[in-house]
Each structure stands twice: as structure tokens, then as C-alpha cells.
Image (tube, grey):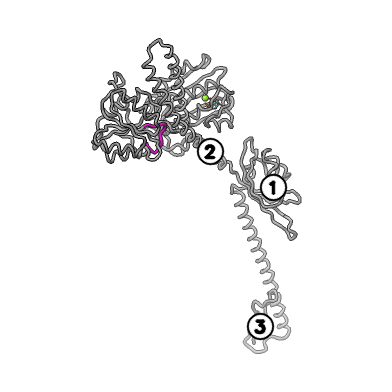
């Protein structure tokens, strides 16, 4: 005999209770009834168990999802938030809020005003207007957090109900202070770059004019006898002319287009050389202390320019110590291994000579610190500061492949530190500066300049000291002249910046078609290109505008007398 009882769970048959017996008719009615009840009980128990299982699974899933959310919200840098706009009540904000805003989450749950209060007063109205519209927004604003200003990017998205009204606003805010700082720095670099281009353009034209003025004055002075009334006027013009030349040099220095004449030197000797002048410059109530590291690694810089750097820094320190103090100049060796010197981070790994200038003066606030290298930025009253001192320093240091840092706080004094990479080059043998050979000659020279004033003056200056001089107004004309006088011309003096063919291109053509002809390139400023292309070697040299009669004659003679480089002529 067999009897089967279905097991029903939630109206679904999920199985059966089967009972078997060896003899037919083994179960009586009553027993069958009991077995039926038993099947129903089992089914009921199964159903309860099933429900329990499902509930537990659901709970587990919820817990897991909550756990995931909490993990995300608690570890992520972003601030998540949920707002009930009707009640103006923050329903949730993630823990990052406490780090970014430097306030407790409780304060925000207690009142949303605490967020409003944190917004920088200059940004507050704008942000509140946008947020009150209950539309999606994406805003950047400043907050005051823990005494400092931070930049926040805050995005909000409305969650709308059936009527279209925003029931919730969810959002995410993040700290973008670093990005803002980088952007500001980039803008500053671009500003410096465009001022630099402008300055270099002006300096180029100006140097042409000054070359003429200063040279002609020198020529005239040689003609006018001692004691003649005209002499004083000419001397006045000469002095003004050399002052103007100094000004263009300064313009070029901060635009980093100055022609540098680097030498292998120790910063120690530069400091020692500058000391006498510094003592005269500083008032008596300022103590000058120098601490020079023995065995300082040599660097490759233009010594004259670095004197200027030291002086500019010292003058600023003096001005910052109106009631006296101490000025300390220090040098030290430094090896940067990646990631080990927080103050020196972003310096490439390697060996450096560091020069620092420290004063016990007024110090600077953050706003000043941010802008101090900008040309024309000054906090000094009109007539006292030009704002060019640090721009010049910055330009010279950067152009020399170095870096400069400032540490300063109001009332705590200031330290400027300059880092210059150690050079692999060996010091050049001291040039014989004494007893210069008379800078004359009889060779044939070609002067190439698009500026007629400079061209005829240069020709005149060289003619005066014995040379045969040809002239050309541009690169093509110069090449034609060289072809017409094949083998005659020993040296070409060419301006770098010319319309049509540049001086550098001309130099390349001459090398190719007239090897052995030496080239003296003249320029009001360096284009990095000329130097990078390694054009300036042996038979090609650079002469800085404005030049005077002496300098021109000396450089021409030097280049003509230089030993012929291997492989040429
Ligand atoms: P200037 O000296 O003509 O003002 P600078 O470029 O040399 O121009 O300096 C710019 C500004 O940087 C100064 O006006 C001053 O506010 C600030 N500054 C520079 N050096 C110092 C220093 N050692 N201590 C305090 N402030 C300084
Ligand atoms: Mg200054």
C-alpha cells in the first residue's frame, strides 16, 4: 500500500510525503487523516523556514550594501551629502567633511547655517543663489577652514518627486586647493613669459639704438680735446647711454633672454667678492654674517649676474630691517635623492650648491609671497621700489638652470635659497686679461645687419682700426657678397634677428659653403634656440648688443686669432 500527501508552501507543491506498506489496506482512515495533518504541519514548518531564510538573505544583502556604502563614504576623499530642501536639513554627510571643512558633522546636522558660514564672504552670495534654485549645479568656491582658505568644487543634483519638486538634493564636494594653486602658478608663468617677450622685443630695438648712441659718443669723445666745453655734454650723454644699457640688461635678465657668459666658479668666491660692496650697502645697524661651506661644489654661472643676484637679495633684506638686524649669507652642499627633502622637493635628484640669504626683518604674508617674483610687483611706496629686483633674480637663477625658494612669515624674517646644479665642467684657465694686443687688423670683414644705423656704424668702427669692410643688409645679400669675393672675407659679423634669413641660418649656410670663414653673431638677446643647437663653438661666437668700439675691435681680433677648430679651413 502507498499513500502520498502533497507538501504545499505558499500554494505551490514543492514535494510530497509518501508512505509505503508491504500489505494492501495497511492504513486505516484515521491514520490516513493523521498523516494528512502531518504533511500539512511539515509544509507549514518548511514555509516558515523558507520565509526566515528569505528575510535573513534580504537583511544580509542590505547589511552588505550598507557596509559597502559606509566603506566607500568613509575612505573616499570626496564629501557626499544628502539634503532635504523643504526642511533645509542635511540628512547625511560623509566623514570626509570633517577633514575638508575642519568642522564636526554634528555641527552640520544641527544646522545647515554652519556650512553657509564656512563659505568665503566674497563667494557666499553667489553660491547661495545657485543652491537655492534647486537645479543641478557645479560650483567652485572658497571656504574658511581651520584658519586657512580652501577651494571647493561642489556639485548638486536634485531628486524630483512626482510633482517635479526637488524632494532631495544629493551632492559631492571635493577639495581642489592643490589644483587651484597649480593653475595660479601656471597663469603666473604665462604672465611672466608674455612680459618677457614684450621686454625682449623692446630691448632688441633699443639695443640697436644704444649701440649707435654709445659708440658715436665714444668716437666723438676721442676727437674733442680735454677741457673743451663740449666734453662735459658728451660725457653726460655717455653716462646716460650706459645707464640705459643697464636698464635693457635688466629687462632681459628677468625675461631670461640675456646673453649669459657662464664660468665655472664657486659661490663662495662670489660671496667673498660681494662682501665689500655689501658692507657699504648695508647700514651700521645691520650685522653681516657669512657662513661658507668648505669644499663647495663648483657651479656654472655668469659671475657678474650672480653679483647682481646677491646684491638684489641683500638690498631687499636691508629694506625689510628698518630697525636693524642680522643678514646671514650661507652656502652649503646638498645632494637631493628623490623624496627625501620636503623643502627641496621638485628639484631633480643630483648634487647642488645652495646659497641662502636670511634676514631678521619684517617677513612676508602669503599674498606677498605668492607674487614676489612678478615683474613690477612691489609693496614699497612709489619711488622706493621698482618691483624688478626679484624678477631679475628669478630670471637669472632660472636661466642658469637653478631654482629659488622662499621661506618667510610675518614678523619672523625671510630666507631666500638658491639651488644651482653642480657642474661637471672644469674651471677654465684664467684668461690673459692683461696687456691686450692692440685690437687692429687688415683682414677683410663683412658686416650684415638690417638696421642701417648699426650697419654703417659697425663698418665705420672696424674701418677705423684698419680692416677692409664690406656690408650687406640681409642674409641673401651677404651670401652673394661672399660668393663674389670668394676666399677674401675672413670674418662675418651678423645680427641674429633679421627679417628673412636669420643670422643663425646665415651662419649655417656660411659653414656649408664657405668653411673657414669665422662668424661673430650679434644680438640684443639670446634665443634659446641658438645656444641649444650648439652653433656657438669655435668659429662661431656671440657678441652682445649694445657693444662699444673697444669691445667690438677686441672680439673681432680674438676670433680672427683663435686657433682654427679641427676640420674647418
Ligand atoms: P622692490 O624691492 O623694488 O619692491 P623686489 O622684486 O625686489 O622689488 O621685491 C618685491 C617685493 O617682495 C618687495 O616689495 C617686498 O614686499 C617683498 N620682499 C622681497 N624681499 C623681501 C624680504 N627679504 N623681506 C620682506 N619682504 C621682501
Ligand atoms: Mg628689491
The quarter in which the C terminus is drawn is: top left
| Camera sees residue 493 | no
Q: Are marks 3 and 2 in contact (CB under 8 Å)?
A: no
Per the image, label 1 sits on a secondary structure element best described as: helix
Q: Can you tell which mark lies on residue 185?
A: 2
Give the residue pinned by disc 3: 4
Quadrant of residue 144 in the image? top right
Circle on res. 130: 1
Examine the rendering and report whether any part of residue 47 can be seen. yes
Q: Nearer the viewer, residue 37 or 564?
A: 564
Span colored in magenta: 522-531
Q: Which element carries disc 2, helix, strand or loop?
A: helix
30 or 426: nearer the viewer: 426
Q: Residue 505: x and y, percent?
A: 35, 40
Magenta span contains residue 527: yes
Query: What residue appears at the point 64 percent right and 63 percent down from the top-left corner?
Result: 57
Amino acid at each position: 500500500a502507498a499513500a502520498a500527501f502533497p507538501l504545499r508552501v505558499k500554494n505551490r507543491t514543492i514535494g510530497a510525503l509518501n508512505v509505503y506498506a508491504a500489505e494492501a489496506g495497511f492504513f486505516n482512515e484515521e491514520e490516513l487523516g493523521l498523516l494528512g495533518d502531518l504533511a500539512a504541519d511539515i509544509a507549514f514548518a518548511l514555509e516558515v523556514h523558507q520565509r526566515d531564510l528569505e528575510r535573513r538573505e534580504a537583511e544580509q544583502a542590505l547589511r552588505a550594501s550598507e557596509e559597502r556604502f559606509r566603506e566607500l563614504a568613509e575612505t573616499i576623499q570626496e564629501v557626499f551629502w544628502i539634503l532635504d530642501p523643504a526642511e533645509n536639513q542635511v540628512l547625511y554627510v560623509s566623514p570626509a567633511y570633517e577633514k575638508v571643512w575642519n568642522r564636526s558633522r554634528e555641527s552640520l546636522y544641527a544646522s545647515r547655517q554652519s556650512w553657509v558660514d564656512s563659505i568665503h564672504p566674497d563667494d557666499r552670495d553667489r553660491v547661495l543663489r545657485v543652491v537655492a534654485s534647486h537645479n543641478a549645479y557645479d560650483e567652485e568656491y572658497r571656504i574658511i577652514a581651520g584658519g586657512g582658505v580652501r577651494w571647493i568644487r561642489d556639485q548638486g543634483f536634485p531628486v524630483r518627486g512626482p510633482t517635479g519638486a526637488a524632494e532631495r538634493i544629493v551632492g559631492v564636494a571635493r577639495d581642489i586647493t592643490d589644483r587651484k594653486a597649480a593653475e595660479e602658478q601656471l597663469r603666473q608663468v604665462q604672465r611672466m613669459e608674455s612680459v618677457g617677450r614684450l621686454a625682449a622685443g623692446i630691448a632688441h630695438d633699443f639695443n640697436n639704438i644704444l649701440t649707435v648712441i654709445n659708440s658715436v659718443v665714444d668716437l666723438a669723445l676721442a676727437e674733442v680735446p680735454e677741457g673743451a666745453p663740449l666734453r662735459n655734454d658728451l660725457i653726460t650723454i655717455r653716462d646716460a647711454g650706459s645707464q640705459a644699457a643697464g636698464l635693457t640688461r635688466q629687462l632681459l635678465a628677468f625675461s631670461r633672454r640675456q646673453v649669459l657668459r657662464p664660468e665655472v666658479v664657486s659661490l663662495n668666491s662670489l660671496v667673498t667678492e660681494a662682501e665689500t660692496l655689501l658692507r657699504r650697502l648695508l647700514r651700521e645697524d645691520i650685522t653681516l654674517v657669512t657662513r661658507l661651506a668648505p669644499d663647495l661644489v663648483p657651479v656654472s654661472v655668469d659671475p657678474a649676474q650672480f653679483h647682481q643676484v646677491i646684491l638684489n637679495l641683500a638690498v631687499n633684506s636691508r629694506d625689510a630691517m628698518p630697525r636693524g638686524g642680522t643678514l646671514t649669507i650661507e652656502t652649503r652642499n646638498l645632494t637631493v635623492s628623490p623624496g627625501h627633502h620636503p623643502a627641496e622637493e621638485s628639484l631633480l635628484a643630483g648634487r647642488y650648491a645652495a646659497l641662502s640669504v636670511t634676514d631678521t626683518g619684517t617677513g612676508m604674508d602669503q599674498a606677498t609671497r605668492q607674487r614676489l617674483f612678478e615683474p613690477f610687483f612691489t609693496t614699497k611706496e612709489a619711488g622706493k621700489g621698482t618691483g624688478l629686483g626679484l624678477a631679475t633674480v628669478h630670471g637669472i637663477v632660472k636661466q642658469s638652470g637653478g631654482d629659488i625658494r622662499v621661506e618667510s612669515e610675518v614678523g619672523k624674517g625671510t630666507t631666500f635659497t638658491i639651488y644651482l646644479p653642480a657642474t661637471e665642467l672644469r674651471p677654465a684657465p684664467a684668461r690673459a686679461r692683461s696687456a691686450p694686443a692692440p685690437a687692429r687688423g687688415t683682414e677683410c670683414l663683412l658686416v650684415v645687419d638690417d638696421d642701417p644705423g648699426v650697419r654703417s656704424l659697425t663698418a665705420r668702427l672696424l674701418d677705423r682700426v684698419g680692416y677692409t669692410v664690406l656690408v650687406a643688409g640681409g642674409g641673401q645679400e651677404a651670401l652673394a657678397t661672399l660668393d663674389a669675393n670668394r676666399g677674401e672675407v675672413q670674418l662675418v659679423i651678423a645680427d641674429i634677428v633679421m627679417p628673412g634669413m636669420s643670422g643663425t641660418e646665415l651662419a649655417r649656410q656660411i659653414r656649408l659653403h664657405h668653411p673657414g670663414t669665422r662668424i661673430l653673431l650679434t644680438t640684443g638677446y639670446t634665443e634659446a634656440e641658438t645656444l641649444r643647437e650648439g652653433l656657438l663653438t669655435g668659429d662661431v661666437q656671440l657678441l652682445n648688443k649694445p657693444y662699444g668700439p673697444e669691445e667690438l675691435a677686441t672680439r673681432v681680433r680674438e676670433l680672427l686669432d683663435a686657433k682654427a677648430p679641427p676640420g674647418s679651413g
